[in-house]
Amino acid sequence: MHERELRAFVAIVEAGRMDYAATSLGYSQPAISYQIKCLEQQLGARLFFRHPDGAQLTPEGAMVLPSARAVLALLDGIKEVTGRQTRTATVEELRVAG
């Protein structure tokens, strides 16, 4: 699972449409669709109902959303502390010290 997939997921939720989310992230609409497809495959769940007017969260997508936002907030915090604002990370790179 990659940061860009989670960012695409949250952007679609906020924009309500894949094409608007793509524009806001500087990607093409097919690239955003591919990122969501990859995320859905990794999670084993459909995240959106797609229709001509946009995209609506599935119940599974609604359950994933708070966690996706939390992971992105953690990654942003790590980047801020380390000064690595331009680097994208994979979720696998996030290690919890214990």
Image: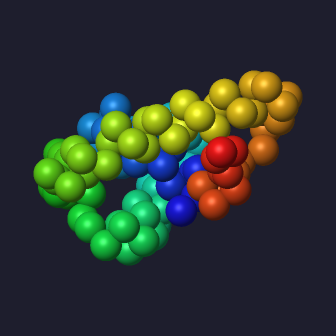
Q: Is residue 56 left or right of residue 41?
A: left
Against 62, residue 49 (above or below) is below
Q: State which quarter of the image contains the C terminus.
A: top right
Against 2, residue 19 (above or below) is above
| Front residue of this view, candidates 5 and 82 | 82
| Direction front: furthest residue | 98
**Residue located at (59% from left, 34% from top):** 74
Corner quadrant of residue 66: top left
| Front residue of this view, candidates 32 and 79 | 79
- Residue 89 on image: x %, y %: 69, 51
Q: Count the numbered circles shown.
A: 0
Corner quadrant of residue 72: top right
Residue 62 at least partly seen: yes
- Residue 26 on image: x %, y %: 59, 42
Residue 54 at least partly seen: no
Against 56, residue 34 (above or below) is below
**Residue located at (64% from left, 31% from top):** 76
**Residue located at (53% from left, 62% from top):** 1
| Front residue of this view, candidates 36 and 1 | 1
Q: Is residue 77 left or right of residue 30?
A: right
Q: Give the color scheme: rainbow, by chain, secondary structure or one colour.
A: rainbow
**Residue located at (33% from left, 42% from top):** 65
- Residue 46 on image: x %, y %: 24, 65
